[in-house]
Image (spheres, rainbow, N blue to C red):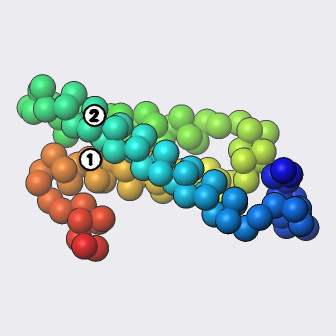
């Protein structure tokens, strides 16, 4: 079964349900990784509550600097500047949720429920 999705759209022989299932699986995998990362970071920072806020801020800054240093050639392959901006926004959201969890504030997802 072909899975090519180019400028013209999906190849005609790729069932829509297949693509939907694939996207749902990718989203589920990302949710698992995000939850796991948040849980690990919260456990790590909980061991030293007096330095937790600074540790989260330092890690956020390091991640954002790393995103900013992605070479243009690599960013172009993944969508260019738009990809870098979106990645930085998602990193900010992730660390904001970690900070909220550390302080007991509801996260954006909890507030939506």
> Whole-percent x and y of residue 41?
27, 34
In the image, is residue 71 above or below residue 103? above
> Whole-percent x and y of residue 59?
35, 34
- Position of residue 74 in the picture relative to residue 86 (left or right): right
Q: Residue at x 30, y 65 (%)?
A: 109
Q: Farthest residue in the bottom direction? A: 112
Mark 1 lies on a secondary structure that is helix
Neighbour tally class for label 1: few under 14, some 14-19, many 20 plus, Cα within 10 Å? many
- Front position in the image: 11 or 44: 11
Q: Which residue is mark 2?
A: 41
- Separation of marks 1 and 2 at Cα, in angstroms: 8 Å
In the image, is residue 88 above or below residue 63? below
Image disc number at residue 98: 1
- Position of residue 33 in the picture relative to residue 96 (left or right): right
Q: Residue at x 67, y 65 (%)?
A: 17
The image quadrant of residue 51 is top left
In the image, is residue 100 above or below residue 34? below
Q: Residue at x 11, y 54 (%)?
A: 104
- Front position in the image: 3 or 42: 3
> Whole-percent x and y of residue 25?
55, 51
- Is mark 1 in CB contact (under 8 Å) with mark 2? yes
**On the rendered image, what quadrant is the C terminus found in?**
bottom left
> Whole-percent x and y of residue 78?
72, 47
- Front position in the image: 10 or 92: 10
Say whether disc 1 or disc 2 marks the residue closer to the N-terminus. 2
């Amino acid at each position: 079964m072909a899975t090519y999705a180019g400028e013209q759209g999906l190849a005609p022989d790729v069932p829509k349900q297949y693509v939907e299932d694939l996207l749902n699986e990718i989203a589920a995998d990302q949710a698992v990784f995000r939850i796991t990362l948040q849980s690990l970071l919260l456990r790590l920072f909980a061991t030293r509550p007096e330095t937790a806020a600074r540790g989260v801020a330092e890690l956020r800054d390091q991640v954002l600097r790393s995103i900013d240093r992605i070479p243009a050639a690599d960013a172009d392959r993944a969508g260019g500047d738009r990809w870098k901006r979106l990645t930085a926004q998602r990193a900010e959201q992730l660390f904001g949720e970690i900070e909220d969890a550390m302080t007991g504030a509801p996260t954006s997802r909890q507030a939506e429920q």
